[in-house]
């Protein structure tokens, strides 16, 4: 069995542990949290051998094969680096870093320490997304000309955790990173920011962003927000048709419209194998078993590109 250690015991760690329990190759070995009380409560719900109130202690445990980092955004880079130095394979919740500078530092450290690392972009590993990706690569909709992504939901400031906190807060790092990942996955050349509309909160973080990025071949929209509810979807348009994916951050269906098809659009429901974490977890364990140091689906360069895209937009925002 591949033994996992989880750093952080919040809501997403609970969801992750539940999915891990459904796999054949993986087991939860240890969890670390700032307080032993919360780690013990986590252990009662998700049985594991060890609990720690010190993240370093978990990293020093030789029985841990892979570390899943489920901390607030502010602490991702720090504990990715510590895990790499300890020789642990790493899966870190998105966004892996707060900015491009941090991501490049991690990339350099990984070149010096050959261990596996992947940003946890689970959206790329659900069956519907993988089906969409394969159809696009097969040329079903022709050459891509436009990618439109929208992910906005109303997130009240009350009890919102770190979402409104300076530095680690804002809709781009929490939700817009999903938009950036999809755009990055289906564009092959660098994009430059053309225009951006936005709204800022009094805390200094962005609560709405509608950005247009483009290169010579494709125009992309990245819309993200905490201050409004809008339909969550991605629309990828090509010279032969388009594919629409609702809830693209955890998609389970696609609608295909081809220009020459007079019968109209066709919808395909493609359910998860277990849940929206399962495919990502299985993929990481497959990579680890093969001795690979990065994913071919969510590579380190993909993480660099996503961080660069978010940075481009953030540099244009001001309060």
Image (tube, helix red, strand yellow):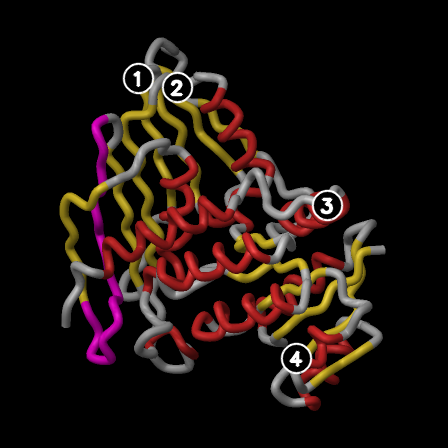
> In the rendered view, does 299 fall on the left or right side of 146?
right
Q: Quadrant of the N terminus?
A: bottom right
Frontmost of labels 2 and 3 is: 3
Using the numbered discs, state the Cα–Cα distance from disc 4 to disc 3 in whole angstroms: 24 Å
Mark 2: give few (<14), some (14-19) or many (20+) Cα within 10 Å.
Answer: many
Q: Mark 2–mark 1 contact, CB under 8 Å? A: yes
Disc 3 target residue:
291
Using the numbered discs, state the Cα–Cα distance from disc 1 to disc 3 in whole angstroms: 40 Å
Element at label 1 = loop
Frontmost of labels 4 and 1 is: 4
Using the numbered discs, state the Cα–Cα distance from disc 4 to disc 1 in whole angstroms: 52 Å
Disc 4 target residue:
56
Image position, residue 127 (x, y; %): 60, 37
Frontmost of labels 1 and 3 is: 3
> In the rendered view, does 252 fall on the left or right side of 258?
right
Q: Is residue 199 magenta?
A: no
Using the numbered discs, state the Cα–Cα distance from disc 2 to disc 1 in whole angstroms: 6 Å
Residue interval drawn in magenta: 200-216
- Which of the two discs, 4 and 1, labels the residue nearer the N terminus? 4
Q: Is 14 or 88 nearer to us in this picture? A: 88
């Amino acid at each position: 069995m591949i033994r996992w250690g989880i750093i952080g015991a919040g809501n997403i760690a609970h969801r992750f542990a539940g999915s891990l329990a459904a796999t054949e190759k993986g087991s939860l070995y240890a969890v670390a949290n700032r307080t032993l009380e919360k780690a013990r409560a986590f252990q009662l719900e998700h049985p594991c051998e060890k609990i720690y109130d010190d993240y370093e202690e978990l990293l020093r445990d030789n029985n841990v094969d892979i570390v899943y980092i489920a901390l607030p955004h502010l602490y991702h880079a720090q504990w990715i680096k510590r895990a790499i130095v300890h020789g642990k394979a790493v899966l870190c919740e998105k966004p892996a870093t707060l900015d491009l500078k941090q991501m490049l530092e991690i990339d350099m450290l990984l070149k010096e320490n050959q261990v596996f690392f992947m940003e946890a972009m689970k959206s790329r590993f659900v069956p519907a997304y993988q089906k969409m990706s394969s159809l696009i690569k097969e040329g079903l909709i022709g050459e891509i000309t436009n990618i439109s992504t929208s992910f906005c939901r109303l997130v009240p400031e009350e009890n919102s955790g770190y979402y409104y906190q300076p530095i680690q807060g804002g809709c781009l790092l929490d939700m817009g990173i999903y938009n950036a990942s999809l755009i990055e996955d289906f564009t092959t050349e660098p994009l430059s920011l053309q225009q951006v509309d936005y709204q800022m909160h009094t805390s200094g973080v962005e609560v709405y962003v509608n950005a247009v990025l483009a290169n010579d071949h494709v125009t992309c929209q990245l819309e993200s927000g905490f201050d409004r509810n809008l339909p969550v979807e991605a629309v990828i348009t090509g010279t032969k048709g388009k594919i629409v994916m609702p809830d693209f951050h955890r998609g389970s269906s696609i609608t295909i419209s081809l220009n020459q098809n007079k019968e109209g659009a066709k919808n395909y429901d493609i359910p998860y194998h277990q849940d929206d974490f399962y495919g990502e977890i299985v993929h990481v364990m497959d990579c680890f078993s093969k001795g690979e140091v990065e994913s071919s689906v969510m590579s380190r360069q993909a993480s660099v590109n996503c961080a660069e895209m978010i940075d481009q937009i953030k540099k244009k925002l001001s309060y």
